[in-house]
Amino acid sequence: GKVLVLHGPNLNWLGKREPAVYGRETLDDLNRVLNETARQLGMELRIFQSNSEGGLIDRIQAEAGWAEAILINPGAFTHYSYALRDALAGMSVPVVEVHLSNIYAREEFRHHSVIAPIARGQIAGFGFDSYRLGLRAINELLEKRNR
Ligand code: DQA
């Protein structure tokens, strides 16, 4: 399957930002894990990070003809970006939302996701494994669809 992986705002700062919450490993480390998982599953990834809403939306639209699924950690946009939600809803492919932290165990404002209602599902709280599990979920979805 062809999967567009999107990292939202501040995820380029992984390893430096709030290590007690997000760990000491960097976005490059995470992308290595993603590429390795994709290789094992026989999936093709395009990985993109942006700190801006428009950057993410432009990329979603640009990959509309290529992507068969989207794996996204929308960062703080999770909690308030209707524009990002609409861009994802406008794609005809499954969207899986992932978070490093368990957003439901944190501040009140993180308990609500405006992305979740248009996502196929959400995985939160497992660190890098949230992404690995998300890729596996997408792999299952695409295999069932192609059966
Ligand atoms: C996050 C959770 C969000 O609330 C936060 O704004 C982030 C990271 C996570 O992966 O746990 O930037 O999406």
Image (cartoon, rainbow, N blue to C red):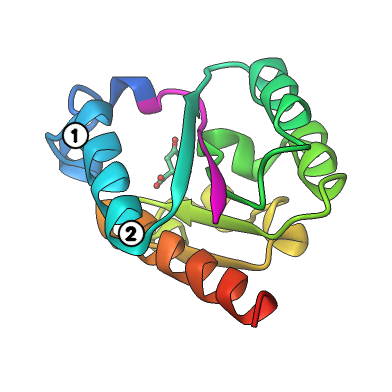
Q: In the structure shown, which secondary structural element does the residue marked by tag 1 occupy?
A: helix
Look at the image and give the residue range highlighted in magenta. Answer: 1-11
Q: Is residue 125 visible?
A: no
Q: Residue at x 54, y 35 (%)?
A: 76
Image quadrant in which you'd find residue 72 = top right
- Secondary structure at badge 2 equals helix
The image quadrant where one finds the C terminus is: bottom right
Against 47, residue 85 (above or below) is below
Q: Position of residue 128 (x, y in %)?
A: 27, 51
At a point 38% along the width and 28% down the height, the residue shown is 11
Percent across and percent down for residue 84 are 74, 35
The residue that mark 2 highlights is 132
Count of marks, rendered view: 2
User: Quick one: 56 or 61, which is closer to the camera?
Assistant: 61
> Of callouts 1 and 2, which one flags the residue occurring earlier in the amino acid sequence?
1
Residue at the far left in the pictured view? 24
Residue 45 left/right relative to 18: right
Specify the quadrant of the image occupied by residue 57.
top right
What amino acid type should be assigned to the residue bearing mark 1? Answer: Asp
Q: Quadrant of ligand 1?
A: top left
Q: Position of residue 125 (x, y in %)?
A: 34, 62
Quadrant of the rendering where the N terminus is positioned: bottom right
Which residue in the structure is indicated by mark 1? 29
Q: Measure the alpha-carbon separation of dots 1 and 2.
A: 13 Å
**Relative to 78, is 129 on the left or the right?**
left
Residue 106 visible in the snapshot: yes
Q: Residue at x 19, y 22 (%)?
A: 16
Residue nearest the viewer, comparing 52 with 18? 52
Q: Is residue 60 above or below residue 5?
A: above
Specify whether residue 48 is painted magenta: no
Q: Amino acid at mark 2?
A: Arg
Crowdedness of circle 2 by 10 Å Cα count: few (<14), some, many (20+)? many
